[in-house]
Image (cartoon, helix red, strand yellow):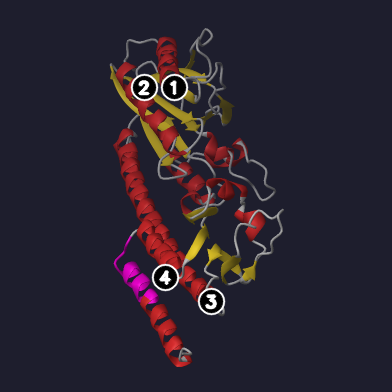
């Protein structure tokens, strides 16, 4: 007896609706990628009697998320980007023995906005029944079902990525707050009297590798430093935090600067194993004698401006950076008397690496016009920050920027 065509069409429609309902319910239940793929595999293998299935999905790169009834060697031989991306429509595979996909019968690409989202390979389909194979009748349905599954899985991935990024953002925000606690608040620095201290700190990312410090050592003596860890981001921030702890533990009025620098070099080498280093300008200032003693370990030369005779000079480096060598060469701290009204301007290289319109690094010429005047140093720093749009997201800035300045009178 011949099968009623309308009944057959009704059964096919019912099968498709039930399959779509099952997948939709699974998606609404927020099932995992593995569960969704298992449901998808069940429909193709058990309901449509497909023996071989490969499902490739494109995220950041192509990956095979379903391999059913296929040998591992077959998968290893297939490169989705090279072997499958050329298929733009449902295609029956020829029996070319040279083809890497000749073990399959049909390629079903899943495309949206002219971009491949996924590619399905099926083989060993049921061809024993009379007439056209049921699978052949359902190719577009398989394509639609694959589209739904792939989009759902991509949404799961994006949601998980958003959750991960949000967690990372929270961690970075916490790390940023903790790092700020390690760096003196500019409002706590001396703002009146014979020595006025100003500071500005701006990490390029949430956390950074720049560091400055100001420490009261007692007996009218003060210690300070400004540092720049090689590299950026979290790793640089961790090294900076470790360095800050060591510096604070060792910097006293009794320790000679050269000994302090040697010990810091040892600590940095211990923690970084020679993979990172930092540049540093470190000094002691005696407010009674007005003597400044300093060591510049590979750092940008601070500028010193004498307001009374309008002279500008630089405190150049005279030894290597901290952590560059296992054993630092002999260090002889420099000493200078700060007579008259003096500005001392210390900074990290992020400030002078701001690019001009010709994509050339600016250098200290971007600092000098703002410094060589009688205005308070805090105003000089504010003008530099405003002029170069440092707080407004200047796209030419690609490093942390830190400034530490002193006015002596």
* Nearer-N-terminus badge (2/3): 3
> Gap in Å between the C-alphas at discs 3 and 1?
72 Å
Residue 156, relative to residue 334: is it above or below?
A: below
Q: Position of residue 163 (x, y in %)?
A: 35, 55
Residue where numbered disc 3 is placed? 140
Residue at x-position 53% and y-position 38%:
350
Q: Are marks 4 and 3 in contact (CB under 8 Å)?
A: no
Main SS, magenta region, reads: helix
Q: Position of residue 138 (x, y in %)?
A: 51, 76
Residue where numbered disc 4 is placed? 47
Helix, strand or loop for disc 3: helix
Which quadrant is the C terminus positioned in? top left
Nearest the viewer among 177 and 80 is 80
* Nearer-N-terminus badge (3/1): 3
> Gap in Å between the C-alphas at discs 4 and 3?
16 Å
Magenta region, residue range:
19-31
Q: Are marks 2 and 4 in contact (CB under 8 Å)?
A: no
Helix, strand or loop for disc 2: strand
> Gap in Å between the C-alphas at discs 1 and 2?
8 Å
Q: As drawn, is 143 to the left or to the right of 363?
A: left
Mark toward the viewer: 2 or 4:
4
């Amino acid at each position: 007896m011949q099968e009623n065509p309308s009944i057959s069409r009704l059964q096919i429609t019912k099968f498709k609706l039930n399959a779509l309902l099952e997948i939709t319910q699974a998606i609404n239940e927020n099932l995992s990628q593995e569960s969704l793929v298992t449901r998808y595999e069940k429909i193709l293998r058990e309901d449509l009697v497909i023996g071989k299935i490969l499902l490739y999905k494109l995220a950041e790169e192509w990956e095979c998320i379903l391999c059913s009834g296929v040998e591992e060697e077959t998968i290893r031989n297939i490169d989705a980007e090279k072997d499958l991306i050329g298929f733009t429509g449902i295609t029956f595979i020829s029996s070319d023995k040279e083809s890497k996909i000749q073990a399959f019968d049909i390629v079903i690409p899943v495309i949206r906005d002219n971009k491949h989202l996924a590619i399905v390979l099926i083989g060993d389909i049921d061809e024993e029944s009379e007439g056209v194979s049921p699978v052949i009748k359902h190719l577009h349905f398989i394509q639609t079902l694959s589209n739904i599954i792939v989009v759902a899985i991509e949404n799961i991935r994006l949601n998980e990525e958003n959750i991960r990024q949000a967690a990372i953002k929270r961690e970075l925000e916490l790390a940023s707050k903790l790092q700020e606690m390690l760096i003196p608040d500019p409002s706590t620095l001396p703002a009146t009297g014979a020595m006025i201290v100003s500071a500005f700190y701006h990490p390029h990312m949430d956390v950074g590798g720049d560091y400055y410090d100001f420490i009261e050592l007692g007996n009218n003596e003060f210690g300070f430093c400004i540092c720049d860890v090689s590299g950026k981001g979290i790793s640089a921030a961790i090294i900076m935090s470790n360095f800050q702890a060591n510096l604070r533990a060792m910097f006293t009025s009794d320790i000679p600067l050269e000994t302090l620098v040697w010990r810091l070099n040892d600590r940095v080498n211990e923690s970084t194993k020679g993979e990172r280093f930092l540049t540093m300008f470190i000094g002691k200032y005696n407010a009674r004698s007005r003597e400044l003693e300093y060591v510049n370990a590979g750092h940008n030369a601070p500028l010193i401006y004498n307001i009374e005779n309008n002279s500008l000079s630089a405190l150049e480096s005279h030894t290597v950076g901290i952590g560059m060598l296992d054993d630092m060469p002999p260090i002889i701290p420099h000493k200078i008397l700060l007579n008259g009204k003096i500005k001392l301007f210390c900074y990290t290289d992020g400030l002078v690496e701001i690019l001009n319109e010709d994509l050339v690094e600016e250098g200290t010429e971007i600092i000098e016009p703002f410094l060589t005047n009688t205005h308070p140093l805090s105003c000089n720093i504010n003008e530099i920050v405003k002029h170069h749009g440092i707080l407004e997201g200047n796209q030419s800035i690609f490093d942390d920027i830190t400034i530490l300045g002193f006015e002596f009178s």
